[in-house]
Image (cartoon, coloured by chain):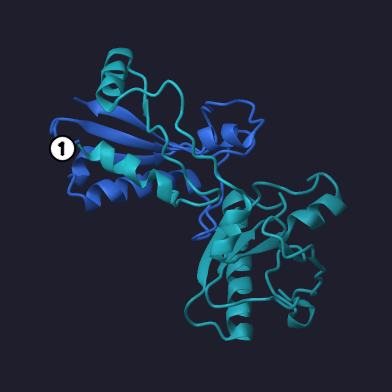
Chain colours: A cyan, B blue
Amino acid sequence: MICHIFMTISLLSQNLNEPYRLYFETDCFEINPGDFPQLNLSTSDTVIINAYCDWRGDEAYNLELSKKRAEAVQNWIKTTYNLDSGVVWQRNAFGENHPAGADVTWEGMKINRRVDVFIRRKPEIQAFEIQPVMVGPEEGAFSLNEELKISLSTGKNMRIRNLNFKPGLDIIVPQSEAVLTSYLS
Amino acid sequence: MQSNPELEIELQGYVCCTEDGRDGSNYRNGSDYLSRDRAKTVYDFLVSKGIEEKRMDYKGYGGSNKIANPERTSEDQNMNRRVEIRIKKN
């Protein structure tokens, strides 16, 4: 089948939450390179590619189609930016799930035949400091043994008190490292 | 963990600041399972200190079971950005 290439690209922004969005013609996964936006990519980035279809066709077929759309976009980015290593790729094929537009209208279906590309940059260390983390000792904290006793008698979870993470990260703030050590014993 | 060798636990990670209990994004590695990654940070620490892996599990619970709800202040957010321990066996 020959696909008439129809693609609109909106470069919504490079904000973490706003993807580069590409639209596809019905039942197609071809990309028109001329329409692809300029991506600002470096080798330490994570590129997240989420691909979707409209509701027409059966579910398995659409899942497969969205996979092909995701692969096509990944291959295109790889080739164009000559990226062999470094970049972390995350491809998600959602088939007809998670529509972005109303599925009952042509306009809506057009929006649903899409691929969203997110580029996540490793934050600079300084970026963590913008949002201060409050680390005051919490009131009403018990000793570890008391917490364990309470947890055993009530079946409730033990919370690791005063163990604080940096916002948006799985990294513990330096002041909290001693808390972890205390849980060892 | 060291003084009670029978103890088996599940480490449960949580995030703040998301709606509908959804998980957050981890800006360090681009994963969309920040709560799991946090639980794993604690897991990895305990493993690195010699606690046997088979005594521990880790799991992400996203933004569910908030302690401070709604989150109004940065202290509230800080409180919800957490890891809990469930005792599986003692």
Indicate the quadrant containing the C terminus of chain A: top left, top right, bottom left or bottom right.
top left
Tell me the residue at 75%/49% (across/down): A100
Residue A121 vs residue A21, the one in the foreground? A121
Could you classify mark 1 by the number of other residues whose Cα lies within 10 Å: few (under 14), some (14-19), or many (20 or more)? few
Quarter where residue A128 is shown: bottom right
Q: Residue furthest front?
A: A136
Question: Tag 1's secondary structure?
Answer: loop
Residue marked by disc 1? B2
Residue A7 point in image, percent of width and height: 80, 70
Quarter where residue B90 is shown: top left
Residue A93 visible in the displayed image: no
Tell me the residue at 75%/74% (across/down): A3
Q: Is residue A176 left or right of residue B23?
A: left
Residue A141 point in image, percent of width and height: 39, 24
Give the answer, above or below, for where A32 lies relative to B13.
Answer: below
Residue B64 visible in the displayed image: yes
Q: Is residue B89 left or right of residue B29?
A: left
Residue B53 point in image, percent of width and height: 21, 46
